Image (cartoon, grey):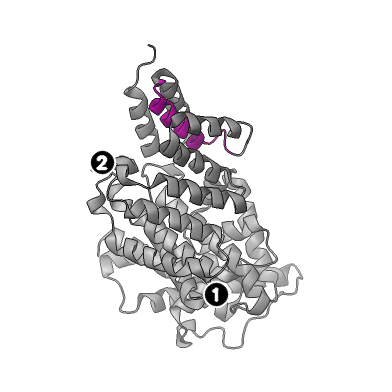
Amino acid sequence: MADRVVEDLLQQLAPQALGALVRRYGHFDLAEDAVQEALIAAAGQWPNDGVPNNPRAWLITVASRRLVDLLRREQARQRREGVIAQRALPEDWLAPPADRPAVESDDTLILLFMCCHPALSSASQIALTLRAVGGLTTAEVARAFLVPEATMTRRITRAKQTVNDSTIPFAMPSGAEMSERIRVVLHVLYLIFNEGYTSTAGPSLHRGELATEAILLTRLVFRLLPDDSEVAGLLALMLLTDARRPARTGPYGELISMADQDRTRWNTNFIAEGVALITEALPRGLVGPYQLQAAIAAVHDEAPDAEATDWQQIVELYQLLLCISDNPIVALNHAVAVAMSRGAPAGLHLLDTLQADKRITDDHRFHSVRAHLLEMSGDRAAARDAYLSAAERTLNLQQQRHLHARAARLPDDL
């Protein structure tokens, strides 16, 4: 089997194996180490020997043996140091956990909610989920948070220890606790999807496996809570956005802006499903940010070409979103929509009001938008400088190339 196929399969199975071990044994931190060792073993064996008939059971069994070894070593260390173990092993700890059947999606979903543990800070909840469920490396999570990798390693280690020391069972939350936890879960899934759709760093514009994983997990949450309009809104947003992914890059991985994309390559099934979800969700009650973003994505996707986009409707939707979300990226996108609807000067005026917001002014997206609107207004020299400023601020190679190409089309003096 091709290495890439094995890698994709392991990406899918990793959270299921981790969930099974945590359900059986607890010891979140050691369980993750054991699963990582099992994944390394599988990555070395499966491409040559073939994938086992039940790859999930294989991973769980191998990881279980690794965990038993780790627990033995840990308890031996604690005995040497005179420390009483915090959590005793079950009497049947040598039995492989695969003999206790569990619904695979349930384990992954419980693991997702467990990573959003109420004892953790919001930042730690997101970081731990990206690491344990989303499959990002610690370095990738660190880039997403714009902190050094060593800092993120300590944060994730502390988060795992907090979960490990808790007395909350490995089970789905209920009642009021579910309502509180679901908002964090949705935000985490949103971040995983965004990292997959546009990578913060690296040679590729996107990481399709992460976007796909985020959609899969959001579908699981939607099955659990089909009447939650924001869950439906997030799923719709992901589908409507990911529908464009096949047309976002050229033959060499280069970025293609939405205005220049071949819309016949967009995923029409995702568009139809996303439109149906948001159409049903919007009338049900209070409208949240995911629903509004999904509605904006639907307006884009339903336009037959860029010129036919209903920019005024998008402006109005962003204005509603600004009323409930103090997010500078929303304000930035609103400025773009205003420029497309009313002209570049109107959009540039809104950008001027964002200059004082330190959350956005050093972000490459602010300078990229400014460059685009300056180019629209005819100030090509200033647009060139802004494109170059944007290129300096992104760590994604394809975005850098795209921005440099835009700058190269414009003169450095007139």
Q: Work out whether 274 lies above or below 152.
A: below
Q: Say left or right for 82 vs 64.
A: right
Q: Position of residue 12 (x, y in %)?
A: 40, 67
- Among the two numbered marks 1 and 2 on one chain, the one whose residue lies closer to the N terminus: 1
Q: Nearer the viewer, residue 161 or 332?
A: 332
In the structure shown, which secondary structural element does the residue marked by tag 2 occupy?
loop
Residue that badge 1 annotates: 110
Residue that badge 2 annotates: 252
Q: Quadrant of residue 381?
A: top left
* Residue contact at pointers 1 and 2, CB within 8 angstroms: no
Q: Say left or right for 188 vs 273.
A: right
Residue sitting at the far right: 82
Does residue 269 belong to the magenta stretch?
A: no
Residue 31, disc: none
Does residue 370 belong to the magenta stretch?
A: yes
Is residue 215 something that shows in the picture? yes
